[in-house]
């Protein structure tokens, strides 16, 4: 299978599994797991935060952060393409009882002026604007990279108005590798942030959420309440630490392959447009010469090629450590056949 569905499709390497065997473990819930303690301290420092916690997924990081920062009836400002809107099963409403204020930002990014306009004045008739959420990189904008100064500028507007700020860092390290900007510079001005290990870093489980010590203390309440208190997580944390040691810089290879795919797609009659490729995500608009995206994805699967449908005529392809040039060739060949 030539799997471009997502970078979540990666499988742990043998070296990563061997790291798991050597992990020193204990009870994570009682902060007695050495491998996990080492990992969360390392990520907290990477993000410029005071403390951190290990969680099963990035989605849980987002949902826990929203629950800590907000009260039921509050409003969260985000872009319409945000992961918390399109891929978390209505979690903000179901788990925290909050409303979402979506901004139609360019390339999945907001401007300070747009954030300022979205913040509601105090009123007994309206929800309280309480939290700003941003996402680095912007998934449905084709992995677009927020400039660090723009991330900080929108956070400054929110914090000046009394809002909390949260950075969804699902592919934050992709942005850092592509630009050379350290992760802590992207997270500057944010009350909470996280990085994923199950995407380009190739781990089977895990994300780390960071913030102040007070924030993490409150986050533990929701982690446990929602069934996320775990025990010997060191076997998982060891794989995450291995990924930080060995799989970060190689993200540049994913970016190069994605650019190659984007360039080749632009020459195909089946494709009418390709979003600018900045990291490891390629989003293509299909031409009138081919069926709608779901039918195209079905036909591609017959060629053992997978992608994600993200619109009526739009597909997304994500590069990662388990696909290479031969897989890219198969992808291009399959899409070319559509027309």
Image (cartoon, rainbow, N blue to C red):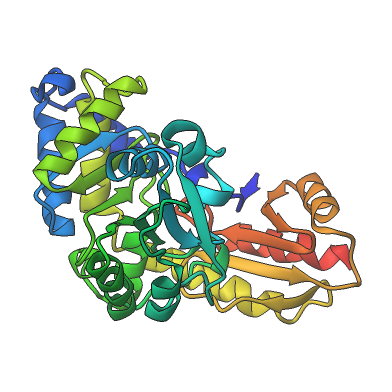
> Which quadrant is the C terminus positioned in?
bottom right
Residue 225 point in image, percent of width and height: 32, 21
Residue 200 point in image, percent of width and height: 41, 53
* Res 8 visible: yes
**Relative to the observer, which residue lies in front, 141 or 273?**
141
> Which quadrant is the N terminus positioned in?
top right
Q: Is residue 278 above or below residue 102?
A: below
Residue occupying the point 73% across, 63% down: 314
Residue occupying the point 46% across, 37% down: 97
Q: In this view, does 27 lie to the left or right of 331?
A: left
Q: In this view, does 85 lie above or below 285?
A: above
Residue that extends furthest to the front in the rendered view of this protein: 124
**Relative to the observer, which residue lies in front, 280 or 131?**
131
Q: Is residue 331 above or below residue 212?
A: below
Residue 278 point in image, percent of width and height: 47, 75
Q: In which quarter of the image is residue 116?
A: bottom left
Q: In this view, does 10 lie to the left or right of 4?
A: left
* Res 7 visible: no
All told, the count of numbered labels is 0
Residue occupying the point 14% across, 50% down: 44
**Relative to the observer, which residue lies in front, 132 or 202?**
132
Residue 34 point in image, percent of width and height: 8, 29
Residue occupying the point 28% across, 40% down: 68
């Amino acid at each position: 299978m030539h799997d471009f569905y997502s970078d979540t499709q990666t499988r742990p390497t043998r070296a990563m599994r061997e790291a798991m065997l050597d992990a020193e473990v204990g009870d994570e819930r009682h902060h007695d797991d050495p491998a996990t303690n080492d990992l969360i301290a390392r990520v907290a420092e990477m993000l410029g935060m005071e403390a951190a916690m290990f969680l099963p997924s990035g989605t849980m990081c987002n949902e826990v952060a929203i629950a800590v920062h907000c009260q039921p009836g509050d409003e969260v400002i985000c872009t319409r393409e945000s992961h918390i809107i399109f891929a978390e099963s209505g979690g903000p409403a179901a788990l925290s009882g909050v409303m979402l204020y979506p901004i139609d930002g360019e390339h999945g990014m907001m401007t300070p002026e747009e954030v300022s306009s979205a913040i509601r004045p105090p009123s007994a008739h309206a929800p309280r604007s309480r939290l700003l959420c941003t996402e680095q990189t912007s998934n449905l904008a084709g992995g677009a990279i927020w400039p660090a100064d723009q991330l900080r500028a929108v956070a400054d507007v929110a914090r000046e108005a009394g809002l909390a700020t949260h950075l969804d860092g699902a592919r934050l390290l992709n942005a850092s590798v592509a630009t050379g900007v350290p992760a802590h510079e992207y997270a500057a001005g944010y009350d909470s942030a996280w990085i994923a290990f199950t995407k380009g870093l190739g781990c089977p489980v895990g994300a780390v959420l960071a913030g102040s010590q007070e924030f993490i203390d409150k986050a533990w309440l929701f982690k446990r309440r929602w069934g996320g208190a775990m025990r010997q997580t060191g076997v998982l944390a060891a794989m995450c630490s291995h990924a930080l040691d060995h799989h970060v810089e190689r993200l540049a290879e994913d970016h190069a392959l994605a650019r190659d795919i984007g360039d080749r797609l632009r020459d195909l009659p089946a494709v009418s447009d390709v979003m600018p490729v900045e990291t490891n995500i390629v989003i293509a608009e299909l031409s009138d010469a081919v069926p709608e995206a779901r039918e195209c994805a079905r036909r591609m699967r017959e060629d053992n090629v997978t992608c994600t449908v993200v619109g009526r005529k739009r597909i997304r392809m994500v590069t990662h450590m388990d696909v290479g040039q031969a897989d890219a060739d198969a992808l291009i060949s399959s899409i070319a056949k559509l027309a």
